[in-house]
Amino acid sequence: MDILAEIANGVITGDDERVAELTRQVIEQAKPAQSILDDGLIAGMNVVGERFKAHTIFLPEVLLAAKAMYAGMNLLKPILIEEGIPSIGKVVIGSVRGDLHDIGKNLVGIMLKGAGFDVIDLGNDVPPEDMVKTAGEQGASVIGMSALLTTTMPVMAQVVELVDKEGLKVSTIVGGAPVNLEFARGIGADAYGFDAANAVDRVKGLVGLA
Amino acid sequence: MFELSFSDVAPERRSVLQDQGIPPSAAVNEQIEAVCSEAMATILENAAPAALVLEISPEDFARVYHGEGRNEARTPVGDIFRESDHLALFAITLGRETSHEITRRFERNDFAVASMLDAAASATAENAADLVQQRYRKSLEETGWSAQEGGVLRYSPGYCGWHVSGQKRLFEFLHPERIGISLRESFLMEPLKSISGVLIAGPREIHNFSISYGFCSQCETRSCRQRLRALYA
């Protein structure tokens, strides 16, 4: 098996030590970093994402795969930066102001990184101004907002309004247990993700990759 | 203050796996079993459940419930509590270590265990709140309150139109700091795995509100229906 296929397989099976070892080897062999990323790490995560959507694997297996992917990515990232290889898109994510619940947001961040996005995670209880300011400063393509409380959902609308007011060329996506598509449309968000995998698909759509 | 031991509120493996999207009928492979076992062992090691309950008069509760004046115009709790027999404020927490451990696991890219541990902690916190609710009901029965047609349910700021800022007055009255819970400026509790609110005891039918409040259409969870079904089970 080709070593990049082996890396992909290591990601799929959640074998982080093996992925780290193989990534080290291919870096030493001077394989192009873009190819290691696309044909090894992301290729593996793409298979995992498809299996998750087909319900043939479960969330813990996706997260074990993500850990394996990160094990390789941590070794590769300095080279990607050095060679100026851009990510497929930059996404600012956070749980909105007043909301401390961040597990769903964390999962979306993990899966976005797994798909090759550059993710700026602002954490939880994030004021609308911080989300919009960071997106503008970092040149992000998408702002992803999460809320678990019905009382914090209106903050999502404030973020969308602020994006419009500032005239930022950034798309918005919302998610979280009390949120639905109707709400997303009502506040003028560009997309709604019903779970982490779906959010990744929607974000890909927003940046023109789907 | 209610004494709580971890063994009384320990999460069921099945419910933790279910929270992670694994149906009870699914075959669980060795990898997932290992993750689950590690999460269960970690919560056992880190959780320090504690609870606080304080009876409150309807007049005092009206002041607590009004909070910062940011509730929705009409809410279930606003309609229910005036018809109650007894009211009590409550708070439960698993302590700081569990939340810290979840954060540490995420920071170490140990995502699967972190996520499973978060699910186990949420289930433990809910079990603790359920236990407090049961014990409150039992304590009322011991004082002669007829539970035959009655029911006790809990409601929390942040849900069903009770604005999360309601935590401020709830804290001023209950002082959950005594069990290690603090309130952030944004009215959210630290540690995160804490639950606070009001226990409302009264005829079961008062809890059976129609889901026609303005905010119900925006709610995807409908958890109020599950709790109501449990009350009538």
Image: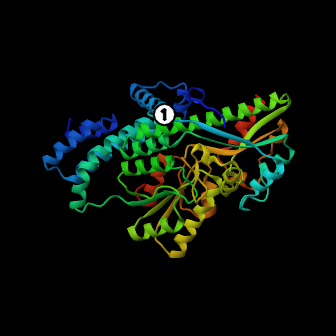
> Along the horizontal axis of the image, is A167 left or right of A30?
right
Q: In front here: B139 or B66?
A: B139
Dot 1 alpha-carbon crowd within 10 angstroms: few under 14, some 14 to 19, many 20 or more: many
Q: Nearer the viewer, residue B124 or A85?
A: B124
Q: Can you say whether B207 is above or below B72 in the image?
A: above
Residue B32: quarter of image:
top left
Residues A178 and B64: in front is B64
**Of helix, strand and loop, which one carries label 1?**
helix
Is residue A28 toward the left or the right of residue A106 in the image?
left
Whole-percent x, y for residue A21 in the image: 21, 39
* Quadrant where the N terminus of chain B is found in the figure: top right
Name the residue that disc number 1 marks. Answer: B43
**Which percent across, then down, holds residue B204?**
83, 36
- Which residue reaches farthest left? A29
Residue A162: percent from the left, percent from the top?
55, 71
Residue type at mark 1 is Ile
Q: How is the image coloured?
A: rainbow
Q: Nearer the viewer, residue A115 or B76?
A: B76
Q: Quadrant of residue B34?
A: top left
The answer to whether residue A109 is visible is yes
Residue B212 visible from this viewpoint: no
Q: How many marks?
A: 1
Residue at horizontal 71 percent and vertical 31 percent from the top: B135
Pointer 1 chain: B
Query: Which x, y percent locates residue A129?
Result: 51, 69
Quadrant of the image for the C terminus of chain B?
Answer: top right
